[in-house]
Image (tube, grey):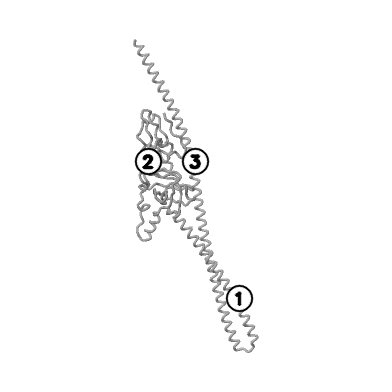
Amino acid sequence: MVWKILSALSAVCLGTACYFAWANQKLLVEERKREGFANENLAAMTAHIAKAEEAKKSRETQRDMANQELETTKTSVADFAAKVQTSEQELAAVKTNLEQTAKVVAQNQKVIDEAGDIKKLLAQIEAIKKERAEAESALANQTQHLAAAQERITSLTNAAKEAEEREARGRRGIVDDDFTAKVAYSYTDWGFVVLNKGNGGGVFANADLEVKRGKDVVAKLRVRDVEQNSSVADLVKGSLAEGEHIRSGDLVVAAAEQSAKTTAAKTADGAAAPATGTTGAAPAATPPAAGAAMGTDPFGAPAPAPAAAPAAPAMGADPFGAPAAPAPAAPAAPAMGADPFGTAPPATPPAGGAKPAPSTADPFGTAPPAAK
């Protein structure tokens, strides 16, 4: 009788072991798929970093070229100043010669008055008049050269001034008053957007911008990172109405009050410069504490808090921070504005007819984790 009981227990244990072996095999297949997705995403991030390094080197080369051009312009201005000084010296010499000629004419006129040979004196007078005309012609020529040189110096000085103003404006983060751009990608729930313009389009770091729809200002932005053809701007906390979202294609213009201009005006009046950015502007919106240990945005924004945490799978989570697949017994929808490395947005729109949240799909194309 005991051997029958032991045989039954052995069969039960064997069946349980087979079930767990089958379950672990399935989890191993899913883990290998995740590893493949992680490797692909790592390759995409490596390529993106390489492109960013190339863009940085290109900007540094352009900056060096601009500095070299500025130095060349300053050298040209100095050369023209030296030429003007030389021309002024030559003009002074011509004036001295003219005064001497006038003295000679006066002396000759006195000789004519005292002399009796009129024809000879007339010939001498004609020769002196000819010399005087030549001296006056040379003086007029030198005057024209001096005026042309002064105009050239003025033009070069203005060009150098404009170049210095552009460089200073870029360092202080002031964009042109007529600046316009578009929102290429919107991550409102993450507190930032991606613009379709960069250094080549007149965008500078720490610049204050506004998102407009028609004549209304929807939100305020502050530029954080700038590349050659794109830039990342943080959403100023409190500037976006509750329930509103920035959409791709929204118009972006220069802010009516830029913090760099306000600081410069206060410094010129003798007041202490403010320690922060635009007057009344708060720092970029900070999302709730991140629920995933490794889920970070590719542009540096912190990850939002996930929805009610479902049971985590037994063998590891997504290496880039995507929420783990929910347990079969209690599935839960992911939070709005989920991780841009692969978590899909909510399948159904919010209740009450509100506008659906903008897409937060992964910009690098990473596939979501496989559901059990």
Q: Does the residue at mark 1 contact the one at mark 3 (Cβ under 8 Å)?
A: no
Image coordinates of residue 165 in percent, x first then y, are 46, 58
Residue at mark 2 to residue at mark 1: CA–CA distance: 89 Å
Where disc 1 sits, the SS reads: helix
Q: Which tag is nearer the camera, tag 2 or tag 3?
A: 2
Q: Quadrant of residue 340?
A: top left
Q: Which residue is most to the top? A: 1
Crowding at dot 1, Cα within 10 Å, few <14 / some 14-19 / many 20+, comes out as few
Image coordinates of residue 362 in percent, x first then y, are 44, 38
Image coordinates of residue 326 in percent, x first then y, are 38, 31
Q: Residue at x 56, y 81 (%)?
A: 103
Residue, disc 2:
354
The mark that comes first in sequence, 1 or 3, is 3
Residue at mark 1 to residue at mark 3: CA–CA distance: 74 Å
What's the residue type where badge 1 is placed?
Glu
Q: Which mark is residue 134?
A: 1
The mark that comes first in sequence, 2 or 3, is 3
Residue at mark 2 to residue at mark 3: CA–CA distance: 38 Å
Residue, disc 3:
47
Where disc 3 sits, the SS reads: helix
Q: Quadrant of the N terminus?
A: top left
What's the residue type where badge 2 is placed?
Ala
Q: Which residue is most to the front? A: 353
The mark that comes first in sequence, 2 or 1, is 1
In the image, taking residue 48 as reference, residue 293 lies left or right, namely left
What's the residue type where badge 3 is placed?
Ala
